[in-house]
Image (tube, helix red, strand yellow):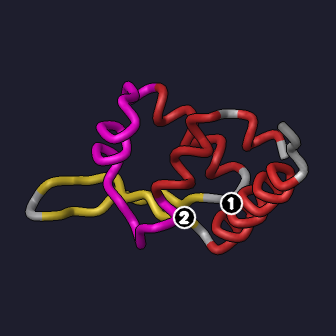
Amino acid sequence: MKIFNSVVRVKILALLYGLEYCEFNYLKEKLNLTDGNLEHHLKKLEECGFVETKKSVIKGRVKTIIKITNKGRVAFKNYIYEILQLSKNIEC
């Protein structure tokens, strides 16, 4: 799947996989990305239906909340499974 060709998108999904949701700035800081770069990758993930973003007011401030979808969870889990299966076939 082409969406997994980007290390950044894989990292975004990996972080979100273990969380119910997170704020845009949390992802930005954890992945050391600019606003524009993160927005670009989130847009690609949204287009695939892997994440959802929404604006919420938290403590009087507007925050962008990102959540992995069930489709995103399944796709990420399958991707990791495939990687693990491939690694079993590596001979040194």
Q: Indicate yes or no whether the magenta region holds residue 29.
A: yes
- Disc nearer the start of the sequence (1/2): 2
- Work out whether 61 lies above or below 69: above
Q: Does 45 sit left or right of 86 as displayed? A: left
Other residues around mark 1 within 10 Å, as few (<14) / some (14–19) / many (≥20): some
58 sits left or right of 2 in the view: left
Image location (x, y in percent) of residue 71: 70, 69
Indicate whether residue 23 is drawn in magenta: yes
Measured as percent of width and height from the top left, residue 67 is found at 47, 64
**Number of the label disc, if any, that sits on residue 68:** 2
Q: Could you tell me which secondary element the residue under label 1 belongs to?
A: helix
For label 2, the SS is: strand
Mark 2 and mark 1 in contact (Cβ < 8 Å)?
yes
- Residue 1 lies left or right of residue 41; in this view the side is right
Q: Using the rendered view, name the quadrant where residue 88 is placed.
A: bottom right
Residue for point 68% across, 60% down: 76
Please give the range of residues in magenta: 16-36
Query: Looking at the image, which is closer to me, 35 or 62?
Result: 35
Q: Position of residue 20 (x, y in %)?
A: 41, 72
Identify the amino acid type marked 2. Answer: Ile
Mark 2 nearby-residue class (10 Å; few <14, some 14–19, many ≥20): many
Residue for point 65% across, 41% down:
44
Question: For the residue marked with disc 1, what is the amino acid?
Answer: Phe
Determine which of the numbered discs, if any, sits on residue 76 in the image: 1
